[in-house]
Image (cartoon, rainbow, N blue to C red):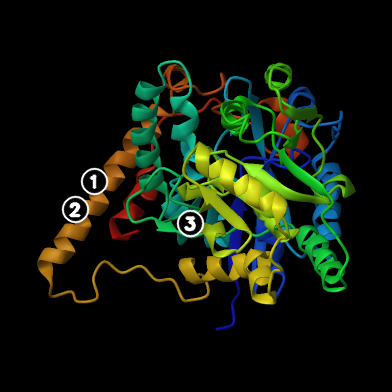
Amino acid sequence: MDKKRQIAIFTTASLPWMTGTAVNPLFRAAYLAKDGERIVTLVIPWLSLKDQKLVYPNNITFSSPSEQETYVRHWVDERTGFKSDFGILFYPGKFSLDKRSILAVGDISERIPDEKADIAILEEPEHLTWYHHGKRWKIKFRLVVGIVHTNYLEYVRREKNGRMQAFLLKYINNWVVSIYCHKVIRLSAATQDYPKSIICNVHGVNPKFLEIGKKKLEQQQNGIQVFTKGAYYIGKMVWSKGYKELLELLRDNQKELTGLEVDLYGTGEDSDQVQEAAKRLELAVRVHPGRDHADLLFHDYKVFLNPSTTDVVCTTTAEALAMGKIVVCANHPSNEFFKQFPNCRTYDNGDGFVKLTRHALAEEPAQLTEAQRHELSWEAATERFLRVTELDQEFTRKLSKSPTKNFMSTSLRLSSSMEGASAYVHHVASGFEATRRIFGAIPKSLQPDEEQCKELGLPIPAVSGHAYLATEESKSSGVEG
């Protein structure tokens, strides 16, 4: 009667890589486990030493999974202010240089024993299942929830032959997500649309940013001038992360923005080009290396400029609002959640950007209410997540509540059979090295290598077969997502 739900959160990255799919699932695990009502396990990628050196910053590497687990736990406990109570498991991963992301190796669903397979949360479900070859997630787990983090189509459109690539990727994403997920949450309407998906921002802000904002609020209430610096932007320094749009807005409106000074903070592949473009402007645009957004250096800036339209829900925008700053951002679906806050100002064109930027620099930010601060928090994000997924309600699968409705029952069986056939096609295709390579998989990623198996304590796999276990597939005949 009182059996706790068991939740496994699978994600595509891990600290110390400070990317959204490393940070947000970590906070989700901590806050879902906080009240002790659920058993939560975070499942993250383990990289070989060679890949660690390519991915992790500041020459940080780990000789064992337990060493990395210690690092991850210390990081999250220090920021939440409480000792986290969730498990951590590692799956074998490899870093793809061309995709600049980590891809899973082998069947990562096996990291959760069958007897503990209850609920799976797939952070970036398309990314986790493009090359999945193994048990069907919907069969192994009673409920599979996909959370869509990334606007892959927007990134692909910016590449060579981007329109055709985006067209193909859209259908591949729809295919794998429908096969493997019962429910899909889109953080905003900026992501690809998926059938029967729910739009809800289930992310919160790192608690330390709310603490910074609280201190600023206390100073404001005591009549202290708290924002003594002007405008800035922070983000990975690649053109697609808003730098192209920002520098174009500044270039095209230099006369209207005379006297404006902007500081840009970031590190990335396009740093040199961004610096050159900034030097060509008449405005004072200074380019600096990347820093932690919570650094004391940023506390006194008043205005955060963020024209990026490739984000789904921009983490740095949420952080800036939590710190009490004014945010000037594009009127774009990725910013819809932030429009409820009085310090969020959205523009539609260059004239609007100029007007809002000038006004923001001339006025003081509104003081956030307690309710507004809560809405930005991980506590509120967890409440939203539990509400839209209905995790705390008993999850049962029934084809039809009324067995006499033969037509509906037949339709559901047909739908399940078609989905099973589609899953079988994906399973077979993903089981051949040649097919995997055609669609961009890392070579020899069908099974983990001997080194990764030893590091993770996994059995060294035999040569993989391509048969789809009939016993597993037969279970799907009575399952309706």
Quick check: marks 3 and 2 in contact, CB under 8 Å? no
Separation of marks 3 and 2 at Cα, in angstroms: 23 Å
> Would you say 95 lies left or right of 240 here?
right
- From the top left corner, tell me how far across and down residue 422 is, in percent: 30, 40
Quick check: marks 2 and 1 in contact, CB under 8 Å? yes
As drawn, 377 above or below 11: below
48 or 230, which is in the foreground?
230
Residue at 44% x, 57% y: name it.
199
Mark 3 falls on what kind of element?
A: strand
> Would you say 452 lies left or right of 182 here?
right
Mark before the other along the chain sequence, 3 or 1:
3
The residue singled out by tag 2 in the image is: 414
Q: Amino acid at mark 1?
A: Met
Residue 424 appears in which quarter of the rendering? top left
Separation of marks 2 and 1 at Cα, in angstroms: 6 Å
Q: Amino acid at mark 2?
A: Leu
| Image depth: mark 3 or mark 2 in front | 3
The residue singled out by tag 1 in the image is: 418
Q: Residue furthest left?
A: 407
